[in-house]
Image (cartoon, helix red, strand yellow):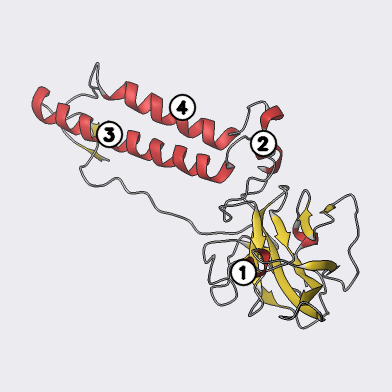
């Protein structure tokens, strides 16, 4: 914006409506997106999973990212190839992040077919979940059987949206972050349209430039990258989700909104999501 000659004037009948619409949309985004009734909420809305079943991989660990206070997808104690073949007398043993055997609990949905769902996920549930599958296979002559074992490892991390949004997003039928980002982008486009039309009106309908007016190409939107305390980004560890704010690993912490988890040498941090050292 800059000063010019003439009196302070505003174009009539054009840009104000666009600006009001943009500001209204932006305020809706910032003050609480999800006001819908959550009765029909999809129970397993997870941004980084296209299906509600995540199969294990016998060759390497599988990273899973779950929204704060949402249920995880089902972690399947079997790889996709094996699931399509006949498995006789399968048995499943799940081990949690603290080395404990997992059974049905208030925060777990563990099915008889070896599928594990983590309910109302938070940073305290982050970590390694390992399942050992034992099963029998019939040999070619149909007279002999062989018992086999296979282990699958899942690294499950919480991916929060932003401080204070859990209560609002918990009732949303759609993915809270996707909808909010869409609203912000739409607000940006409307604000840009406002200034573009204002510039056109000033050039074609005003003899004198108003005292305060918009300078073309001076509007810029800058993305500020940050994570909430206790979370950070790590391209090496989470190369399949480089933009995710993930709970800091044990031994690290983040006391502020920076995107890097710091190493703690003073004390031994055993849990995920530490905010202090």
**Image x and y of residue 209, in percent:** 15, 30
Mark toward the start of the polypeptide (1 vs 3): 1
Q: Which residue is mark 3?
A: 193
Say which of marks 1 and 2 sits in front.
1
Count of marks overlaid on the render: 4
Instruction: Give the foreground label among 3 and 2.
Output: 2
Whether 272 is drawn above or below 172: the answer is below
Label 1 belongs to which residue? 81
Q: Secondary structure at mark 4?
A: helix
The one nearer the camera, 40 or 145, is 145
Q: Which mark is residue 24?
A: 4
| Mark 3–mark 2 distance (CA, rounded to whole Å) | 30 Å
Q: Would you name the residue on which mark 2 appears?
A: 168
Which one is in front in this view, the residue at disc 4 or the one at disc 1?
1
Quadrant of the image occupied by residue 204: top left
Badge number at residue 261: none
Helix, strand or loop at mark 3: helix
Can residue 276 be seen from the camera position used here? no
């Amino acid at each position: 914006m800059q000063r010019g000659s003439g009196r302070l004037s505003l174009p009539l009948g054009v840009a104000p409506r666009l600006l009001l619409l943009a500001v209204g949309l932006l305020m809706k985004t910032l003050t609480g997106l999800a006001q819908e009734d959550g009765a029909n909420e999809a129970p397993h809305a997870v941004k980084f999973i296209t299906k509600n079943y995540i199969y294990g991989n016998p060759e390497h660990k599988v990273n899973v990212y779950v929204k704060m206070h949402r249920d995880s997808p089902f972690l399947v104690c079997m790889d996709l190839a094996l699931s399509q073949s006949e498995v006789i007398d399968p048995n499943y043993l799940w081990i949690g992040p603290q080395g404990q055997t997992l059974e049905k609990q208030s925060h777990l949905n563990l099915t008889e077919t070896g599928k594990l769902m983590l309910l109302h996920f938070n940073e305290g549930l982050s970590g390694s979940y390992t399942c050992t599958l034992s099963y029998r296979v019939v040999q070619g002559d149909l007279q002999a059987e062989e018992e086999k074992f296979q282990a699958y490892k899942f690294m499950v991390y919480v991916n929060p949206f932003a401080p204070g949004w859990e209560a609002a997003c918990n009732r949303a039928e759609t993915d809270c972050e996707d909808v909010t980002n869409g609203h912000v982008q739409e607000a940006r486009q409307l604000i840009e349209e406002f200034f573009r039309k204002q510039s056109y009106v000033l050039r074609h309908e005003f003899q004198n430039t108003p005292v305060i007016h918009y300078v073309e190409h001076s509007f810029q939107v800058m993305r500020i990258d940050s994570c909430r305390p206790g979370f950070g980004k790590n391209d090496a560890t989470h190369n399949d989700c480089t933009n995710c704010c993930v709970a800091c690993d044990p031994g690290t912490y983040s006391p502020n909104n920076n995107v890097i988890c710091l190493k703690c040498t003073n004390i031994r941090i055993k849990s995920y999501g530490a905010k202090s050292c």
